[in-house]
Image (cartoon, rainbow, N blue to C red):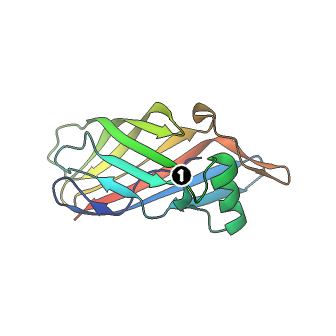
Amino acid sequence: MKYLILLSLLSLESYAATSSIKFTAKTNGPGIEVEGEVQNPIVSMDFNKMEGTNFSADVMNLSTGMEKRDKHLHEKVFSATNNGMAKIDFTILKMSCPTSANSEVECDCIGNLKIKDLSNEIKFKALVNKTNKVVSGKALVSLNQFKLTAPTFMGISVLDNVEVTFNVSAK
């Protein structure tokens, strides 16, 4: 699912980056959503040139806070086991930001998301705070686009589009 991108680590320009990547998946059950986060993601980032920024995570680091649900997510949805790393990789290909004197600008972004050897372009908006060197945003990821089986339990199934939100601070 949308268990993706943004994490804590080092950037290409020696910025220390602290980040969070969270996901929310709606279900066919009224008012029922599954929320989770990527733990220990890795990001390579040059705040002055966002193109090429890369986020990656081991699928085994996706967590919903419920052990049984996490095991199902890892094994049934992503076909991952503790024996081998199944990665999610995201790279920003293009970021178009308006020229502005404001410290915050909204940018149009295109990135490449790779899950289980399938790659697709993802379009999203990102808010860039030039003063604090923070980039945040959200994107929708389609399970079908990556041939991922929607998790189901007791008749409740996750819907196709999963919302992924991220916040990266280069400090």
Q: Is residue 62 left or right of residue 122?
A: right
Residue 108: x and y, percent? Answer: 33, 36
Along the line of sight, the residue nearer the viewer: 86 or 73: 86
Work out whether residue 77 or residue 66 is closer to the camera in this orientation and state it.
77
Q: Residue at x 70, y 43 (%)?
A: 150
Dividing the picture into quadrants, the one containing residue 68 is bottom right
The answer to which image quadrant residue 153 occupies is bottom right
> Residue 30's x, y, as percent?
77, 52
Residue furthest to the front? 83
Classify 10 Å Cα crowding around label 1: few (below 14), some (14-19), many (20 and above). many
For residue 151, above or below residue 7:
above
SS category of the residue bearing label 1: loop
- Residue in the image at 46% along x and 38% along y: 114
Residue type highlighted by circle 1: Tyr
Q: Seen in the image, is 53 located left or right of residue 123?
A: left
| The C terminus, quarter of image | bottom left
Mark 1, residue position: 3
Question: Where residue 127 sits in the image (x, y, percent)?
Answer: 32, 49
Q: How many numbered dots are placed on residues in this image?
A: 1
Q: Residue at x 35, y 45 (%)?
A: 126
Q: Percent position (x, y) of residue 66?
A: 67, 68
User: For this rendering, which residue is in front, 127 or 143?
Assistant: 143
